[in-house]
Image: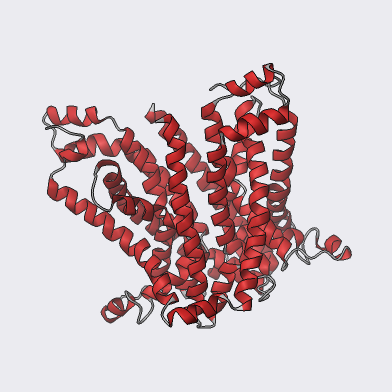
């Protein structure tokens, strides 16, 4: 179990060299190029690009839609995780497999499939549009695509906690006369809360940066249905490299902040697990 | 009489919760999955075959295979080296190193593509130098491979590291005492020990490498027949309103995803078998 002290097994230098060289060349130097290019912008240009009304609308939409999608995923993810961890029922293997599909299915495929479903005349759009519910080419469609990509995170972080949760604690609570609802609120929910928060943060981080599944269904109207990653691509295609760089830096810093939160949550999850 | 707490739930509650789970997954995952195949075969099997044997589609398949064929082996070498480094030795900065390896997970695919444009594009940091040496990276296959390696960088490490840590180093130490050399230990002891973890990482890495859209889209330049991968070909066909063509090509990736899931499940059973 314990790692052997440096020196007993050979290969420290070689494995360190391979890891650091590849990490530097493939990940760190390219990310440094982003910081380097941003630094060459004047403060005024940077502020103009980052704080333009179009950019602000894009952040609001990206974070707002991602927040709604991650919240939906927490609620339904908890139900799916509970059902998978506690019940045996016909079709359980299918449910288990469907949960992982968003990890495996390329985002562009999910994007075109969801758009076709919700577009006017689509299998779902046909029934929604007459009631004035517009999903495709509207913010609701962005949320739908983000629910798809973030779906596995909450289920897969909460499920192991539910499996490990001491059944005796629930039984003890029941023996002491606690109602099922009381047990849920005071025993089960506090135990899964850290894992659910981690799942929420992971789903949120994934949704904020998501591009492939969203661009097809969103309609891409500047100021209305234009997410931040799309704005970066648009600026790049219009040869506004400084603008693209500035917005990318803002989004990158936001994802690092989220990564930091996820790490902190995971540390606290591990602590409660012990 | 008293089973696990889950079975203590009344039957009506169990039925309701299972129904909610099925409805949620059916609506958001099952329906899109079915849609791909329904739309792909809308105009019949002949049209389907025609769509997936178009020269543009075939060249997209070729570029996708080439990209994954380079990215996956690179990730395996780096992943095994990184897992070996982190699981076998104690050194300062280990957790920082792990965080840095995980970094691509939290970077938007679009930004992953953008950083290579900023570094290697015509007006990028190294652009003039590449130009002087007549090297084309951005809007060419090398850029697609680089962006894919970036996106998939953590995959193999993430799967191999926990297994290497769990299995410990006792056999390696014994091999060392018996006079085995470093490479022999790695290839004869460690790699066979963690082979299912490596395969697991390869499968996940391959699925992502073949399906990546955002990062590849930014560096590709969308030159049809030259710099389009399968996901980009789906986008082009879709934007041309060739729906059945787009879904036919998308079905290739969907089948890949389904095969990936089955393989993943089989390997999970394999990995768990000896420990449970």
| Scheme of image coloration | secondary structure
Q: Quick check: A84 left or right of A141?
A: left
Q: Quick check: A20 left or right of A216?
A: right
> Does the image show residue B54?
yes
As drawn, A138 above or below B26: below
Q: Camera-side residue: A32 or B143?
A: B143
Residue at (67, 37) in percent of width and height: B81
**x, y percent for residue B10:** 13, 44
* Residue A176 occupies quadrant: top left
As drawn, A61 above or below A164: below
Residue occupying the far top of the picture? B177
Q: Camera-side residue: B100 or B17?
A: B17
As drawn, A47 above or below A96: below
Residue at (63, 18) in percent of width and height: B174
Residue at (39, 54) in percent of width and height: A151
Screen quadrant of the C terminus of chain A:
top left
Tally of numbered discs:
0
**x, y percent for residue B56:** 63, 76
Q: Camera-side residue: A253 or B198?
A: B198
Residue at (38, 40) in percent of width and height: A195
**x, y percent for residue B99:** 59, 40
């Amino acid at each position: 179990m314990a790692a052997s002290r440096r020196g007993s097994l050979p290969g420290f230098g070689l494995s360190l060299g391979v890891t650091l060289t590849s990490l530097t060349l493939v990940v760190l130097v390219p990310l440094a190029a982003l910081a380097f290019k941003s630094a060459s912008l004047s403060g005024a240009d940077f502020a103009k690009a980052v704080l333009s009304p179009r950019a602000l609308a894009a952040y609001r939409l990206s974070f707002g839609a991602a927040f709604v999608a991650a919240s939906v995923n927490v609620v339904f993810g908890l139900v799916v995780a509970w059902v998978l961890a506690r019940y045996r029922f016909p079709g359980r293997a299918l449910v288990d497999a469907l949960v992982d599909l968003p990890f495996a299915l390329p985002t562009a495929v999910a994007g075109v499939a969801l758009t076709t479903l919700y577009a006017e005349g689509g299998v779902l759009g046909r029934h929604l549009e007459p009631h004035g519910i517009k999903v495709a080419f509207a913010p609701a469609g962005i949320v739908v695509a983000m629910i798809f990509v973030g779906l596995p995170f909450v289920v897969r972080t909460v499920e192991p906690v539910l499996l490990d949760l001491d059944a005796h604690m629930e039984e003890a609570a029941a023996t002491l006369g606690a109602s099922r609802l009381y047990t849920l609120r005071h025993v089960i929910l506090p135990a899964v809360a850290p894992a659910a928060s981690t799942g929420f943060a992971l789903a949120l981080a994934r949704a904020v940066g998501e591009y492939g599944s969203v661009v097809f269904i969103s309609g891409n109207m500047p100021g209305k249905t234009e997410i931040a990653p799309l704005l970066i691509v648009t600026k790049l295609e219009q040869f506004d490299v400084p603008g693209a760089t500035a917005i990318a830096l803002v989004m990158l810093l936001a994802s690092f902040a989220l990564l930091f939160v996820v790490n902190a949550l995971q540390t606290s999850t591990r602590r409660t697990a012990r | 009489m008293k089973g696990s707490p889950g079975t203590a739930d009344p039957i009506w509650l169990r039925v309701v919760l299972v129904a909610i789970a099925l409805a949620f997954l059916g609506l958001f995952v099952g329906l899109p999955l079915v849609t791909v195949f329904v739309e792909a075969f809308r105009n019949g099997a002949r049209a389907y075959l025609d769509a997936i044997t178009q020269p543009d589609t075939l060249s997209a398949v070729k570029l996708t295979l080439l990209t994954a064929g380079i990215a996956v082996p690179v990730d395996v070498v780096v992943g095994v080296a990184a897992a070996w480094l982190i699981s076998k030795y104690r050194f300062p900065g280990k957790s920082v190193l792990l965080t840095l390896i995980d970094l691509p997970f939290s970077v938007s695919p679009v930004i992953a593509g953008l950083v290579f444009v900023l570094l290697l594009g015509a007006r990028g940091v190294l652009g003039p130098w590449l130009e002087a040496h007549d090297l084309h990276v951005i809007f060419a296959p090398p850029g697609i491979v680089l962006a894919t390696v970036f996106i998939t960088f953590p995959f193999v490490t993430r799967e191999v590291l926990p297994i290497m840590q769990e299995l410990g180093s006792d056999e390696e130490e014994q091999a060392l005492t018996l006079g085995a050399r470093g490479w022999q230990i790695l290839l004869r002891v460690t790699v066979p020990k963690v082979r299912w973890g490596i395969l697991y990482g390869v499968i996940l890495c391959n699925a992502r490498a073949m399906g990546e859209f955002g990062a590849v889209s930014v560096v590709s330049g969308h030159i049809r027949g030259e710099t389009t991968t399968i996901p980009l070909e789906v986008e082009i066909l879709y934007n041309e309103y060739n729906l059945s063509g787009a879904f036919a090509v998308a079905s290739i990736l969907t089948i890949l995803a389904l095969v990936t899931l089955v393989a993943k499940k089989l390997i999970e059973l394999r990995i768990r078998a000896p420990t449970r």
